[in-house]
Image (tube, rainbow, N blue to C red):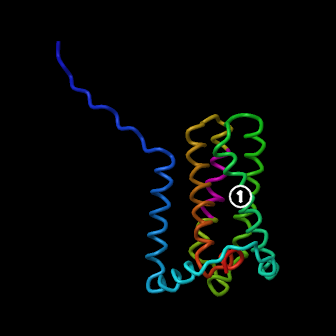
């Protein structure tokens, strides 16, 4: 009789811990990308005064940015409901299709948003290409009942495409920051 020593399987990190680590990495990357401007950004952040949205700023935005913003915020809210709700039920399927339309609307508006880079596309437009490529695949995987692939892809799109970009949109000095804190 041989005694084989089995090492216990490592327990995967909890969702909250993984999300916190990812957000920490994003904050560090954004901080490093700001270079010397981080002090000015921190000064703005420390002077933040939360208030109701400044709708006059919203009205000054181009139609493409308005469509992008509204679709993205709706997709973020609905996506949160989908992430934490029961999967596979009728609600999930119908709301999932609505989320896909919102995500496509958000991505579809971005080629018309060029104000960040003096009339040209910026590095952020790579997210558009990624969403337009991977979103149909996620739908196909759901239709084929490849639940694991569908789940990973949709979670990646939601957290990477919407939650992290929301943090980027609220960098002090940007329009979203001004609308709610400026």
Residue 149 vertical placement versus 67 (above, below): above
- Horizontal arrangement in the rendering, residue 12 relative to residue 59 (left or right): left
Residue at 44% in and 82% down: 35
The quarter of the displayed image where residue 51 is located: bottom right
Closer to the camera, 155 or 111? 155
Q: Quadrant of the C terminus?
A: bottom right
| Other-residue count near label 1 (Cα within 10 Å), few / some / many at <14 / 14–19 / ≥20 | many
Task: Please give the range of residues in magenta.
Answer: 129-139
Q: Which residue is mark 1?
A: 103
Q: Quadrant of the N terminus?
A: top left
Closer to the camera, 182 or 106? 182
The quarter of the displayed image where residue 61 is located: bottom right
**Residue 41 in magenta?**
no
Residue at 72% in and 77% down: 179
Total labels drawn:
1
Q: Secondary structure under badge 1?
A: helix
Residue 155, horizontal then vertical, whole percent = 59, 49
């Amino acid at each position: 009789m041989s005694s084989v020593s089995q090492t216990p399987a490592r327990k995967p990190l909890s969702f909250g811990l993984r999300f916190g680590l990812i957000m920490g990495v994003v904050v560090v990357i954004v901080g490093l990308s700001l270079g010397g401007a981080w002090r000015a950004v921190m000064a703005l952040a420390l002077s933040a005064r939360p208030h109701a949205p400044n709708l006059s700023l919203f009205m000054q935005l181009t139609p493409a940015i308005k469509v992008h913003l509204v679709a993205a915020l709706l997709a973020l809210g609905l996506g949160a409901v989908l992430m934490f709700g029961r999967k596979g039920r009728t609600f999930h399927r119908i709301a999932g299709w609505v989320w896909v339309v919102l995500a496509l609307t958000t991505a579809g508006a971005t080629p018309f948003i060029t104000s960040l880079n003096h009339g040209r596309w910026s590095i952020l437009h790579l997210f558009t290409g990624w969403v337009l490529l991977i979103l149909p695949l996620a739908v196909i995987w759901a239709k084929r009942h490849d639940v694991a692939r569908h789940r990973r892809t949709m979670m990646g799109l939601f957290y990477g495409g919407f939650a992290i970009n929301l943090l980027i949109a609220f960098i002090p000095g940007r329009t979203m920051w001004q609308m709610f804190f400026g």
